[in-house]
Amino acid sequence: MERSVPIRSVSRSIAVLQAINRGEWLTVMEISKAVGLPYPTTFRIIQTLMHEGLVTCEASCKRYRVTALVQSLALGYADGGSLIEAARPHLVALTQQHAWPVSLTTHVGRSMIVRDSTHTISSLTFCNYAPGYSLPLLECASGHAFLAHIGNEERLGLLAGLEAYERRTPLLDMFKSERLVQMIRDNGYATWERNPHTQFPGKTSSIAVPVMDNGEVVATLTLVFFASALPMAEAVRRYADDLKAAARDISAKLAQRTGDHPAHVEALATC
């Protein structure tokens, strides 16, 4: 990475905008805590985003949210939708079977981004995590499932980039070694107890599995459940196999689209 990159102020502004986008009418203090920035710095960034029309303030309670103008940031993004089309029936079927919401997420930069979910059709959820909701790569089950199933060189490159942006954490070191990576690969799923980066931190836990296309992980399926409802070991026993089966079926659909031989899809059953 060039010495002039990243530009710290740009990285911080993006983090603040993402935090506001995830929440609903947040205070400056709440945004400051979410992104780990000093209050004055956060406030100046928010004022800049307001000046650009991306954020608005509720004057009576000094809370902030994004405006419709943030949609303009996605106008240049093209997506054929084949991944979502292949996954959607399986997301719905899993939620109908187990009642819990299921999300389809993909990797973008330092985050896992929700592409589709069934939060709106499940009563067992605290809120709707709409497409575009982002989670830190190292601090969610979907990020762990993704990191464990990419190539070693790509994984180490991503971790080096994360280390340049963020303080060093035990999770960085764990993913640099093969032990955690191999354990997730052997299990075929990753877990996270009491998710910290949701609108209700600590209230939910997650199980995530990789979705493969042409031998590469292109997305993850994540089932989210109330942390107080059942322990992780029981959730894994109940839901992990069905999640993996759905991921294999989605991979098979993607393989048909790209003309892969069915034998290649069968090989994915071991992941």
Image (cartoon, rainbow, N blue to C red):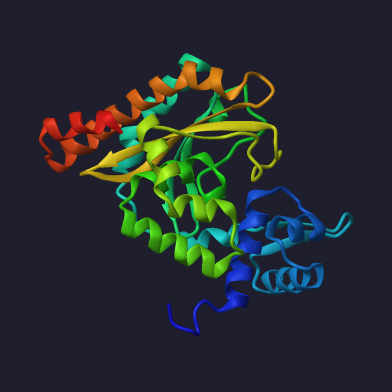
Q: Is residue 16 above or below residue 85?
A: below
Residue 268: x %, y % from top left: 24, 33
Q: Quadrant of residue 121?
A: top right
Where, quadrant-wise, is the C terminus in this rendering? Answer: top left
In the image, farthest residue toward the right: 60
Asked whether 63 or 100 is in front, the reply is: 100
Q: Is residue 85 above or below residue 167?
A: above
Q: Quadrant of residue 200?
A: top right
Q: What residue appears at the point 47 percent right and 66 percent down from the top-left corner?
A: 161
In the image, farthest residue toward the bottom: 4
Q: Is residue 223 above or below residue 36?
A: above
Q: What residue appears at the point 30 percent right and 49 percent down from the top-left corner?
A: 80
Q: Is residue 5 above or below residue 226?
A: below
Can residue 157 be seen here? yes
Residue 77: x %, y % from top left: 39, 59
Q: What residue appears at the point 85 percent right and 58 percent down from the top-left corner?
A: 62
Residue 236: x %, y % from top left: 49, 22
**172 lies left or right of 183:** right
Can residue 134 be seen here? no
Where, quadrant-wise, is the N terminus in this rendering? Answer: bottom left
**97 lies left or right of 149:** right
**211 lies left or right of 230:** left
| Tally of numbered discs | 0
Residue 191: x %, y % from top left: 52, 34
Q: What residue appears at the point 23 percent right and 33 percent down from the top-left corner?
A: 253
